Amino acid sequence: MNLIEIPEKNISINFPSQLDELNQNQFILFVELLLDCIAGKISLPDFKYRLTVSFLNIKMDRKYYRLSKEDQENALGEVYRLSDLIDSFFDEEQREGRSVKVIILPKFKTVG
């Protein structure tokens, strides 16, 4: 887990750093958004942004829209910066001469 802290707001949030740290709802959202990304419905940055917003439980409510345009842009910039943490769910491999992202699957324990 990554610990995200906003001291001035007295906020601490655990942000998953690998797939086996996701709860069931987070995993379902991960799969849904990943399928949308693969299908070309959303971009990779949008995929990462949407997961980050969900993991951090960010609500774009009235308080957000009352902020100045500059503060709104700064807030969005921070969310996009934090969305790079989603990269820890993937590895990069070379396939047929091009770089592709590959999901890092959790290690399963064998029984027996």
Image (tube, helix red, strand yellow):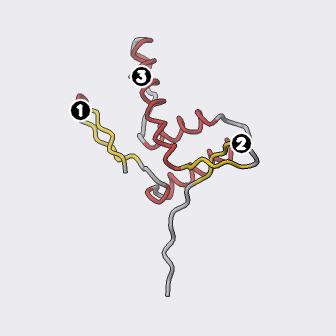
Q: Measuring from the top left, give residue 99's x and y in whole percent.
A: 67, 43
Q: Measuring from the top left, give residue 109's x and y in whole percent.
A: 48, 75
Residue that appears at 58% across and 33% down: 45
Of the numbered discs in the image, which one, if any, rests on residue 83?
none
> The residue tagged with tag 1: helix, strand or loop?
helix
Question: In the displayed structure, would residue 37 be above or below residue 68?
Answer: below
Of the numbered discs in the image, which one, if any, rests on residue 64?
3
Of the numbered discs in the image, which one, if any, rests on residue 7?
1
Is 91 displayed left or right of 11 in the figure? right
Residue at the far front: name it: 97
Q: Amino acid at mark 3?
A: Tyr
Within 10 Å of the Cα at label 3, are there few (<14), some (14-19), or many (20+) other Cα atoms? few
**Image depth: mark 3 or mark 2 in front:** 2
**Image depth: mark 3 or mark 1 in front:** 1
Label whose residue precedes the other's in the sequence (1 or 2): 1
Of the numbered discs in the image, which one, if any, rests on residue 98?
2
**Could you tell me if the residues under marks 3 and 2 are in contact, i.e. CB atoms within 8 Å?**
no
Q: Amino acid at mark 2?
A: Arg
Question: What distance separates the C-alpha of mark 3 from that of mark 2?
Answer: 40 Å
> The residue tagged with tag 2: helix, strand or loop?
strand
Label whose residue precedes the other's in the sequence (3 or 1): 1
Question: In the displayed structure, would residue 93 be above or below residue 73?
Answer: below
Q: Amino acid at mark 1?
A: Pro
Q: Measuring from the top left, give residue 10's x and y in whole percent.
A: 23, 35
